Image (cartoon, helix red, strand yellow):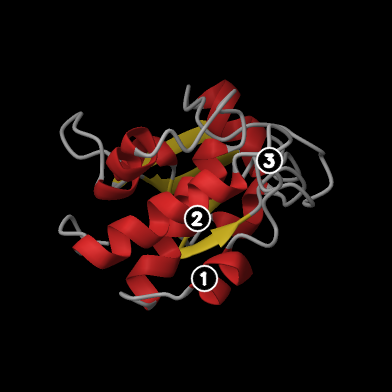
Amino acid sequence: MEISLRVNGAVRKVDADPATPLLFILRNSLGLKGAKLGCGAEQCGACAVLVDGEPVPTCVRAVSEFAESDIVTVEGLAGDGAASDVQRAFIAGNAAQCGYCTPGIVVATTALLRRRKNPDAGDIRDALDGHLCRCGSHTRVIRAIASLAREGASDGV
């Protein structure tokens, strides 16, 4: 079945079983490798993308659920190939080790900063509650986000 999706600002058509998890469509049909398969149970956040501005896990939910949605992957956050403010803050703060979970955390952070320009540590922890980092980078992630919030992001965050 042909399914039309709006991904990173462009309409993309894919031929897929409507029950296929969105993550597999993004990675295998559209070549967007940022979101990762972690737990496969919507528990770790590695598969998160922005859906209508909110971070949403994609490893279980059917692609057909997203036909009318605006989907933004971590690749879509970079404008013209330049890293977003959040991505730059993570790089500057060494807020990733293996980087497997980082795309999900970056999209969750982007959603947080769009909702709340000056989040406190509790806001940041709440926003990242569904994102697991097995490398233990959480302290650096929180520092990078707090630093960005203090400096003020400028690229749509």
Of residues 74 and 91, the one nearer the viewer is 91
**Where is 76 relative to 153, above or below?**
above
Q: Identity of the amino acid at label 2?
A: Ile
What residue is rendered at 28% in x and 39% in y? 88
Q: Helix, strand, or loop for circle 3?
A: loop
Q: Quadrant of the N terminus?
A: top right
Q: Identity of the amino acid at label 1?
A: Ala
Quadrant in which residue 154 is drawn: bottom left
Of residues 102 and 141, the one nearer the viewer is 141
User: Is residue 55 found left or right of 57 in the rendered image?
Assistant: left
Say whether marks 1 and 2 touch (CB < 8 Å): yes
Of residues 60 and 69, the one nearer the viewer is 60
Q: Identity of the amino acid at label 3?
A: Cys
Image coords of residue 4 (percent x, y): 47, 46
User: Which mark, residue 53?
Assistant: none
What residue is rendered at 54% in x and 24% in y? 29
Read off the residue under disc 3: 133
Crowdedness near tag 3: few (<14), some (14–19) or many (≥20) residues, C-alpha within 10 Å: some
Image coords of residue 148 (percent x, y): 29, 57
Mark 1 or mark 2: which comes first in sequence? 1
